[in-house]
């Protein structure tokens, strides 16, 4: 059964600091997604990682995928208040179904 | 404007009263999906559809029905709602399976 675990669940950080959110998944899914959700809002796609070693960057966010370790990371560089949101990773399952499994999310609060 | 729309956005109903939440996308996407979001549980997939007339269960399908008679529409039906179906529901679509998903604005359902 595919499971996706994120940590930490909550993250409070100072502006200007760096931090990493971790996403572990339990089977051989090779597609990993990151989404952002602002309070009271819907989800928007940040990154789609499709192969081992994939790295994508957008502004202060960088995502990477290691399929051998079954690990994806979302690295935040020099955090700013506007990055405060909940971040979800999700894995696509390949074993004959076309489901998605989401992690429980990491609530990030960037303090000024 | 390319978008996923859901209606209603808010709904309070009573146990056992059948309801339908509509979902429509104008992007000609093949893949559509329903999720529920509950605190501490992240998003869980209810049903998904690969294309017209092709639907399958996600991880939490009990108590829900779906249909995909047209490519653009994917309604979620609760035949006999119960209080444990009180949740925030999101519809999502993507060009094909394993592309990034575009989420609707959400429907907050309360069953008393």
Image: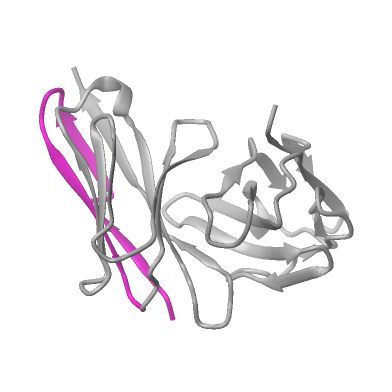
Q: Which residue shows up at 78% across the image and 36% down it?
A: B8
> Is A60 placed above or below A96 here?
above
State yes or no: residue A17 in magenta: yes
Quadrant occupied by the C terminus of chain A: top left
| Spot occupied by residue A48 in the image (x, y as percentages of width and height) | 41, 52
> In the rendered image, which quarter is residue B77 located in?
bottom right
* Span of residues in magenta: A1-27
> In the rendered image, which quarter is residue A22 located in?
bottom left
In-front residue for pair B88/B2: B2
| Spot occupied by residue B73 in the image (x, y as percentages of width and height) | 82, 49
Q: Which residue shows up at 12% across the image and 24% down it?
A: A16
Task: Give the colouring mode of the picture.
Answer: one colour
State yes or no: residue A60 in magenta: no
Residue reaching furthest left? A17
Looking at the image, how many numbered discs can be counted on the residues? 0
In-front residue for pair A32/A1: A32
Quadrant occupied by the N terminus of chain A: bottom left
In-front residue for pair A97/A23: A97
Q: Which residue shows up at 23% across the image and 27% down it?
A: A110
Horizontal relation, residue A25 to residue B108: left or right: left
> Is A103 placed above or below A47 here?
below
Horizontal relation, residue B36 to residue A2: left or right: right
Horizontal relation, residue B41 to residue B48: left or right: left
Q: Which residue shows up at 62% across the image and 49% down it?
A: B87
In-front residue for pair B27/A21: B27
> Is B21 placed above or below B5 here?
below
| Spot occupied by residue A18 in the image (x, y as percentages of width and height) | 12, 35
Horizontal relation, residue A19 to residue B109: left or right: left
């Amino acid at each position: 059964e595919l499971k996706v675990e994120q940590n930490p669940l909550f993250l409070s950080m100072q502006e200007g600091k760096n931090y990493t959110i971790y996403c572990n998944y339990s089977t051989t899914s090779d597609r990993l997604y990151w989404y952002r959700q602002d309070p009271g809002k819907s989800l928007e796609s940040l990154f789609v990682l499709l192969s081992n070693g994939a790295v994508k960057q957008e502004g202060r966010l960088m995502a990477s995928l290691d399929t051998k370790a079954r690990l994806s990371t979302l690295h935040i560089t020099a955090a700013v208040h506007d990055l405060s949101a909940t971040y979800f990773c999700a894995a696509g399952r390949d074993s004959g179904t076309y489901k998605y499994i989401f992690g429980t999310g990491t609530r990030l609060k960037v303090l000024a | 404007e390319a978008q996923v729309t859901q209606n209603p956005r808010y709904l309070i109903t009573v146990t056992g009263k059948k309801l339908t939440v509509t979902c429509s996308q104008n992007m000609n996407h093949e893949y559509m999906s329903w999720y529920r979001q509950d605190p501490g549980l992240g998003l869980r997939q209810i049903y998904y559809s690969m294309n017209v007339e092709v639907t399958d269960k996600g991880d939490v399908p009990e108590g829900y029905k779906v249909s995909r008679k047209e490519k653009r529409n994917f309604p979620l039906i609760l035949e006999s709602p119960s209080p444990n179906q009180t949740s925030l529901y999101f519809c999502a679509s993507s060009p094909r399976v394993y592309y990034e998903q575009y989420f609707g604005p959400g429907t907050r359902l309360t069953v008393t």
